[in-house]
């Protein structure tokens, strides 16, 4: 068993195929907290999701939405520092608007990205739920198993 923030989770045993989930939990627990940019995660009635990120000041050419394996990575590259100050020809008395690059990742399981849309300073990423929604019954065969015919059927499709 492995201990995650005081919670003991088994690495093997009855949790077949979940080792990547445990690795993801470990990464999340050990990752530094980040609140920029703020985001909403919306689950629609049909099981699909929408991620909304507040990206005011970013243009489409400064944003990147990438998928690698099952990880969605959204990156924003801010223009060179000092550009805004020069544009305003003055000094800030109060600078409360975030002016920094960011990278935010989301682990996708049974979801695929349909599209991304930038609208009024909000980047919306639409995710389609690909999970099987019906229960399958697996037939149980009785009698002797013919390994040779199963091997041929497996090899020929």
Image (tube, grey):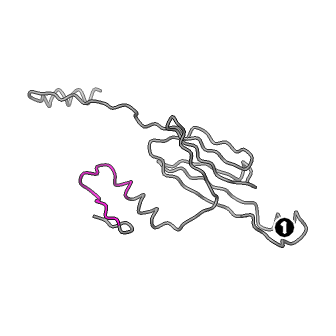
Residue 46: image x %, image y %? Answer: 51, 34
The spot of residue 155 in percent (x, y) is 26, 30
Image quadrant for the N terminus? bottom left
What residue is drawn where x is 33% and y is 67%?
3
Q: Position of residue 51 (x, y in %)?
A: 59, 47
* Magenta span contains residue 128: no
Q: Is residue 83 left or right of residue 134?
A: right
Q: Nearer the viewer, residue 110 or 155?
A: 110
The residue that label 1 is drawn on is 85
- Residue at the farthest right position: 89
- Image position of 100 (left or right of 108): right
Indicate the position of residue 148 as horizontal and vertical percent values: 15, 29
Q: Mark 1, residues whose alpha carbon is within 10 Å: few (<14), some, or many (≥20)?
A: few
Q: Indicate whether 94 appears above or below 68.
A: below
Check residue 9 for magenta coloring.
yes
Question: From the viewer's perspective, is 144 left or right of 99?
Answer: left
What residue is drawn where x is 72% and y is 60%? 78
Report helix, strand or loop for mark 1.
Answer: helix
Q: Residue furthest left?
A: 144
- In-image side of 27 versus 62 (left or right): left
Please name whichever residue, 2 or 83, is drawn nearer the observer in this view of the structure: 2
Give the residue furthest to the front: 45
Q: Which residues are magenta?
A: 7-22
Q: Is residue 74 above or below residue 98?
A: above
Residue depicted at 32% across the width and 49% down the height: 17
* Figure quadrant of the C terminus: top left
- For residue 33, what is the image quadrant? bottom right
Give the tally of numbered discs: 1
């Amino acid at each position: 068993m492995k201990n995650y923030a005081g919670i003991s989770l088994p690495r093997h045993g009855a949790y077949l195929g979940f080792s990547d989930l445990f690795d993801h939990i470990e990464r999340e627990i050990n990752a530094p907290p980040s609140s920029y940019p703020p985001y909403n995660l919306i689950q629609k009635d049909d099981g699909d999701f929408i991620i909304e990120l507040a990206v005011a000041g970013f243009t489409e050419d400064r944003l990147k939405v990438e998928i690698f394996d099952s990880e969605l990575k959204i990156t924003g590259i801010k223009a060179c520092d000092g550009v805004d100050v020069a544009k305003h020809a003055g000094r800030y008395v109060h600078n409360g608007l975030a002016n920094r690059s960011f990278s935010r990742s989301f682990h996708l399981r049974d979801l695929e990205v349909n599209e991304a849309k930038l609208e009024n300073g909000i980047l919306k990423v639409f995710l389609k739920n690909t999970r099987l929604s019906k229960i399958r019954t697996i037939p149980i065969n009785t009698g002797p198993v013919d390994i040779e015919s199963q091997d041929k059927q497996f090899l020929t499709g």
